[in-house]
Amino acid sequence: MEQLLARFAAPDTDPTDLFARLIDEIRPRRADDVEAARRTLQALCFILGNHPELRANVRNALLALQQSCRHAELYTSTGILPNTGFFSEIFRRIGHKCLPEVLDPELLRSFLRRVFRRPSDRHWVIGVGDEAWLELIRALRFDELAPHPALPRPLAEILRSLRVISYWTAAFGMEPELLNLDPALETYESPFVTQNVELIAYIEAYPASWRDSTTAQGFDDKHLRVLFDQCREVIARARKRAARHGTSVRLTYHLKRLQQLLRRSEHLLDILENLRVDPDGQSAYPAIVALFTRLIHDECQRNDLRHHWRQNTELIALRVTDHASAHGEHYISETRSEYFEMARSAMIGGVIIAFMAGFKILLGKVQMPPLTGAIVYCLNYGLGFCLIHILHGTVATKQSAMTANAIAASISESGGKLRDIETLTRLMARTLRSQIVAILGNIGIAIPLAALIAYGIFHFSGEHFVSAEKAVHLLEEQSLIYSASFFYAAIAGVFLFLAGLISGYFDNYAAYNRIPERIRQLAWPRRLFGESRMWRVSTYVGDNLGALASNLAFGFLLGGTTILGVLLGLPIDIRHVAFASAFVGIALVDLNFAPDHWLLLWAVLGVALIGITNLTVSFALALKVALRSRRVTETPWRQIVSALLRHLLHHPRDFLLPPKKGE
């Protein structure tokens, strides 16, 4: 390492290349091996501390880069979303991943990209801790340099960057979507505009206050900090209102950008203020290190699609899961009457599913082109699920995605620390109890009714609904060992999860775009149907648009999977527990109630596994998204599981049966 440091004194060497090689020496083999990186940094600090000539060489190279490079783009662009929009930024990142951009050697931003060239560098740069980087700055001994009588160029670049950021903050703080959520920004003086006026005055006065104690008296950034806090209050208020009234990708994107601009302004002000009041500049080192690590982290993730997607869809995910949580509470029975109401609702769903299963078999007997057949199957599923919803029925497997969000909301209310574990276990017990009765209601009606339909067709026509070969095939399709029913059930579980998201999205869409109010404004339907009927229709659409859209989408996902597998040459299909049970009922009748006993046993076990898989996959995915949208990163699952087992041991009835009368 000493030989490398000695080369900084050579006149014909590229300092950027030397710094890149120095970082290569520090970089651990594994990005998460922060101890190795920390030891190498300590060794570097030791060498710099004991060799003044090497220290001077590295320090002079850094100062030369500061003087020759332009800083503004680094401070105003790195880690700050561009004005192009959410989807444009996605396409930009994809393009830069496929074909990296050309680096301008005159930009300080390009220097960081060449030196910290691996996306994984952010892990060890942050992992070594701020103290390690502070020791490195102290080892360079900038205090050995003569003080600057005039404003140094790096500080002038920071002031220039602050000016740009301030104008952007003022402009984005007056976006129409934000004004719609908070009309007070137009009625009263907006803090986004006020901060611009105050910050421009600060920028103009800063050079005169540089190392001038008489001019610096009464000059500080305290009022600016207050205005930044007021801007954050507006953003928080907008997020809360958006969570209630709906949001959009564009609004979420702008709120995220405003937060980034405010945070960057504060980081730059921290450096300016500490350097202004401290002649040695050492009090500014923590602020410089904080900005440095933040910039490295953001530069390493500049083309990360996953990070971009997660940070900008958080508010929409919260809105979607919040709505699903509100609906999920309706799927959790608490009282005895609610339990039996759930059973009745599930029976309605079972009746319609039995007819849907029979109609699907009839459609299979009609010779249709593949695409036409796929569309008809999709409509059978989709319209059937919509009919179940309209008749206030329940499809048991659709509950899990909804109830997961209600449980996630309960966890997030306590910050993920579960201060009231008993309340959560009772909620989960009620959830499981509701799921069981819903499944039994669906299956308990679907199996005998499907069998009755098959028997009725045989009784009146003299022909079996399906042939014996087809009946055996129906049992084999549900079998635990004769088909990939577990894998197909997992696919259906993913679709159930997606249907829950679709429901929340369209309910968010209806609320954000005020669909019921817009329907009521239509003149000709109001004249045709009357005011009161139009009011009921618009209210129903507002309350049920998400449910209807998700049921229709879920039907198309189920019906289109097989044809998609045919087109792609993939052996994919779906298994849904309610339809699987109905097919077992039909097969029993058309085998004259004398199937192979082992085949029937494996089919029954397969139906049970299909149901468990449907519920588990959709519940797990929905719970994960709901917890992430609420920023619950550390959930004490061990504590939850142990509490559930204790509750099951002492109160097993809560997981299976309704509360007793009077409870």
Image (cartoon, rainbow, N blue to C red):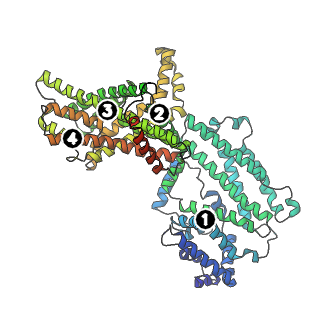
Q: CA distance from mark 1 to mark 2?
A: 50 Å
Kind of residue at disc 2: Glu
Q: Is residue 453 above or below residue 599?
A: above
| Disc number placed over residue 603 in the picture, else none | 4
Q: Quadrant of residue 597?
A: top left
Q: What residue did someone put label 3 on?
A: 440
Work out whether residue 643 or residue 550 is closer to the camera in this orientation and state it.
Answer: 643
Residue at horizontal 43%, vertical 47%? 641
Local packing at callout 4 (Cα closer than 10 Å; few below 14, some 14-19, many 20+) is many
Q: Secondary structure at mark 3?
A: helix
The mark nearer the N terminus, 4 or 3, is 3
The residues tagged by marks 3 and 2 sit, at their Cα atoms, a distance apart of 20 Å
Relative horizontal placement of residue 30, taking residue 244 as reference (left or right): left
Q: Which residue is mark 2?
A: 329
The earlier-in-sequence mark between 3 and 2 is 2
Whether residue 126 is visible here, answered yes or no, is yes
Identify the residue under disc 1: 109
Whether pointer 4 and pointer 3 mark residues with C-beta atoms closer than 8 Å, the reply is: no
Distance between the alpha carbons at the discs numbered 3 and 1: 62 Å
Tell me if residue 7 comes above or below residue 123 in the rendering: below
In this rendering, is residue 428 above or below 103?
above
Q: Position of residue 283 (x, y in %)?
A: 74, 66
Would you call the spot at circle 2 few (<14 residues within 10 Å), some (14-19), or many (20 or more)? Answer: some
